[in-house]
Image: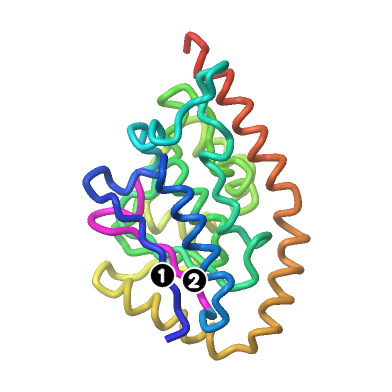
């Protein structure tokens, strides 16, 4: 059907992102990216949530930086989903919790469609570290700086309708219609000229995501310090 789907499938931990899941995610994404039969890529989550954020037990599968105690930068490297590394339309189809690094995943996708029960939160201020997976970088490119500061520093929860108003998501749909509405969006994109969409993504990359790699490195450096702080 020309649609490739990647599902966060660790429902017993609300699809926590970390450890071996990330290289597996990246490998699956690259496979879809280079498959000429695939026109659109969808990212979703199994079970009750899109993703509850970082899964610390999963991070231990890769291991920590021995000097700083901070997770190595490649552990949180989700650049494959960003416009700067994909020429295909990427859709985040979100239900339930979308927390922490999962917000970065949703924001780096080209489109985000969510169900009415979706709930977004950047919880990092509550655990004394900085946003990862481009959480600060991507959020400030979707909402105004005041709102981004509120969401990040206060760890405010963002309901689906608030996310729509703020520009975090494109559409909010009834819970039982998310899969069908995501499929409709896929077909609409498939009906558009492939090469034109590819060029559009290149222009969007130059405008929006040119320094993403630098931001990911800064996130890691900040959290290398904070994981050893007394906060």
Of callouts 1 and 2, the N-terminal one: 1
Q: Is residue 190 above or below residue 219?
A: below
Q: Is residue 19 left or right of residue 167?
A: left
In magenta, the rendered stretch is 40-52
In the image, 126 versus 22, the foreground residue is 22
Say what secondary structure mark 1 lies in.
strand
Quadrant of the image for the N terminus? Answer: bottom left
Residue found at the very far top of the displayed protein: 230
Could you say which quadrant of the image residue 3 lies in? bottom left
Q: Which residue is mark 1?
A: 5
Tell me what residue is drawn at x 76 percent, y 68 percent.
203
Tell me what residue is drawn at x 40 percent, y 48 percent.
21
Tell me what residue is drawn at x 52 percent, y 41 percent.
76
Q: Is residue 197 left or right of residue 44?
A: right
Could you say which quadrant of the image residue 118 lies in? bottom left
Q: Is residue 94 above or below residue 198?
A: above
Q: Position of residue 126 (x, y in %)?
A: 41, 26
Q: Is residue 111 left or right of residue 140?
A: left
Q: Position of residue 197 (x, y in %)?
A: 66, 79
The dot on residue 159 is: none
Q: Which residue is mark 2?
A: 41
Q: Is residue 44 left or right of residue 28?
A: left
Contact flag, marks 1 and 2 (Cβ < 8 Å):
yes
Crowding at mark 1 (Cα within 10 Å: few <14, some 14-19, many 20+): some
């Amino acid at each position: 059907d020309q649609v490739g789907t990647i599902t966060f499938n660790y429902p017993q931990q609300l699809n926590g992102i970390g450890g071996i899941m990330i290289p597996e995610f990246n490998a699956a994404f690259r496979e879809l990216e280079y498959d000429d039969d695939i026109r659109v890529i969808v990212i979703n989550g199994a079970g009750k949530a899109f993703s509850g954020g970082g899964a610390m037990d999963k991070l231990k599968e890769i291991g920590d930086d021995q000097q700083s105690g901070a997770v190595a930068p490649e552990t949180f490297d989700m650049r494959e989903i960003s416009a700067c590394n994909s020429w295909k339309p990427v859709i985040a189809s979100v239900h339930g919790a979308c927390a922490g690094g999962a917000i970065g995943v949703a924001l780096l996708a080209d489109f985000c469609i969510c169900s009415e029960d979706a709930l977004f939160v950047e919880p990092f201020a509550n655990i004394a570290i900085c946003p990862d997976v481009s959480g600060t970088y991507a959020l400030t490119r979707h909402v105004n700086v005041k709102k981004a500061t509120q969401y990040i520093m206060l760890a405010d929860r963002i309901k689906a309708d608030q996310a729509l108003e703020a520009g975090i998501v494109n559409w909010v749909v009834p819970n039982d219609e998310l899969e069908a509405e995501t499929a409709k969006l896929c077909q609409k994109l498939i009906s558009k000229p492939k090469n034109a969409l590819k060029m559009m993504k290149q222009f969007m990359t130059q405008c929006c995501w040119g320094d993403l790699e630098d931001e990911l490195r800064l996130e890691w450096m900040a959290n290398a310090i904070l994981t050893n702080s007394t906060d």
